[in-house]
Amino acid sequence: LELVRRRCPEVPLRCFGPRRTREVPAFVEYVENPNDEALRRLYAGAAVFLFPSRYEGYGLPPLEAMAGGCPVVATRVGAVSDFCVDTVSGLLVAPGDVEGMARAVLTLLEDQEGRGRMSENARFRAKDFDLALETREFERPLAIRNAEPPCGGLGLYFNGSDDEAARHVAGPQHRDQRAGQIHSVARLLGQHP
């Protein structure tokens, strides 16, 4: 944040989260425990959303920012690179690359046209991750499975490829049908790209 502040001192820097920590510089405005409406305002009012996480399971905040039309600078952690397309809906950098994050933020701040294009792309891309749609996709293979008669000792476990998982779940007679269903479930569970 210091690198961005030096180059663009007029740009307000805001952070949010459960509580302010020592790591947040004094020159940064901090919003503690924002509710959903406050989060929507923060995302909508931001020119860039920075997500510098080192480890992440899914990384929902960048997706929320994208849904609000805010281009993202994020690290390649968790599922972030599954929904944030580098140079299209955001800019991705390696975890811990502080200078890379600063360069990416500055690139977006200084290129209003590119930032606008990325903002629209981010909003459009986030629509692909609609919770209601994802829930239906997740439930469909479960409903099919529950409607079928048992075909051996079945249990859902994922151990690598769709084809291998299909063999374990349905046996050879249903391999092709199950492979696609298991891929959908595994993707939602974050177990397969």
Image (spheres, rainbow, N blue to C red):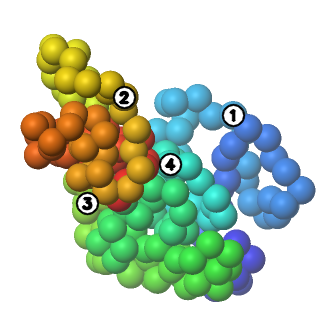
**Residue reaching furthest to the right:** 22
**In front: 96, or 18?**
96
Residue bearing the label numbered 1: 33
Q: Identify which amino acid the numbered label 4 is placed on.
A: Tyr
**In front: 108, or 81?**
81
Are there few (<14), some (14-19), or many (20+) residues within 10 Å of tag 2?
few
Mark 3 vs 4: CB contact within 8 A: no
Relative to 89, residue 145 above or below:
above
Which mark is in front, 1 or 2?
2
Query: Residue drawn 65% across and 85% down?
Result: 99
Mark 1 vs 3: CB contact within 8 A: no
Residue bearing the label numbered 3: 120
Mark 3 vs 2: CB contact within 8 A: no
Query: Residue drawn 31% across and 40% down?
Result: 168
Which mark is in front, 3 or 2?
2
Are there few (<14), some (14-19), or many (20+) residues within 10 Å of tag 4?
some
The earlier-in-sequence mark between 4 and 2 is: 4
Rounded to the nearest angstrom, the CA distance separating label 1 from label 4 is: 20 Å
- SS under mark 1: loop
Residue bearing the label numbered 2: 155
- Quadrant in the picture for residue 77: bottom right
Rounded to the nearest angstrom, the CA distance separating label 3 from label 4 is: 22 Å
Q: Which mark is residue 58?
A: 4
**Left or right of residue 117: residue 65:** right
* Rendering coords of residue 3 (x, y %): 70, 82
